[in-house]
Amino acid sequence: MSRSGGHSTNTQQLLNSHTPPSSGNVTTDPPPFWTIRHDRSISTVSYHSLLGPHRPNPILLEDRSEDSHAASQGCWAQSVALDAHTIVSGPTGIGAYVVWHCTVRTLQGGDLELRKRYSEFDHLRVDLVRSFPHAEAMIPKLPRKSVVSRFRPKFLELRKAGLQQFLNYILLNPEFAASPMVKEFVFS
């Protein structure tokens, strides 16, 4: 047995003489599922959808900040920020509480300065849920209460973030911002 190219001559002869078996069921035609043509190709689906009689309406964006449209009347706040807080306590420290300093920028450019306690935020949320029961799940929950850590810096930072999220959601939503309880919260 001589070797050529790393293969034995018998192996080389088998490789050279190998022909596919000839049987009646071997065909070179593609399978039937390859040849079935569909009416629409992937590239024309969007095109045909656009030509159809039931085309969806386009999205319409409107700036109503300068408008007297009824839906835009509730929109009066542009942004809300909780700037700082003050811990208020008596001479003995009993009955101490935190006052949150809030700045509301109006669409007209003026700023409203609010000073609110957590309990006032809590009352506002309760009033909103009572007035808008269909939207209870949408109204953000307030940060948790804590008797033990209520004056700790980390707790106050988390509370500040939660209160700011709450106020942003309420004051920047025209349905809530136009409500009497929100106006009372802001202007009292």
Image: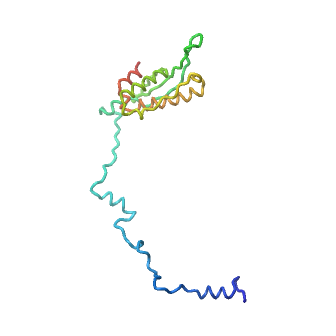
Q: Which residue: 27% across, 56% down? A: 53
Specify the quadrant of the image occupied by residue 17: bottom right
Residue positioned 38% across, 33% down in the render? 135
x%, y% of residue 31?
43, 75
Q: Nearer the viewer, residue 31 or 79?
A: 31
Q: Is residue 13 left or right of residue 106?
A: right
Check the image and report above or below for 78 versus 53: above
* Left or right, 102 with reference to 157: left
Which image quadrant is residue 48 in?
Answer: bottom left
Point out residue 76 in the picture as x, y percentages from the top left corner. 38, 29
In the image, 161: left or right of 125? right
Where is the C terminus found, in terms of image quarters?
top left
In the rendered image of this protein, does residue 141 appear above or below residue 26?
A: above
Does residue 103 sit above or below 32 in this rendering?
above
Kindly give the residue lying farthest to the top in the view shown: 91
Q: Residue furthest right?
A: 2
Name the image colouring. rainbow
| Quadrant position of the N terminus in the picture | bottom right
Question: Measured from the top left, where is residue 106 in percent x and y?
Answer: 41, 28
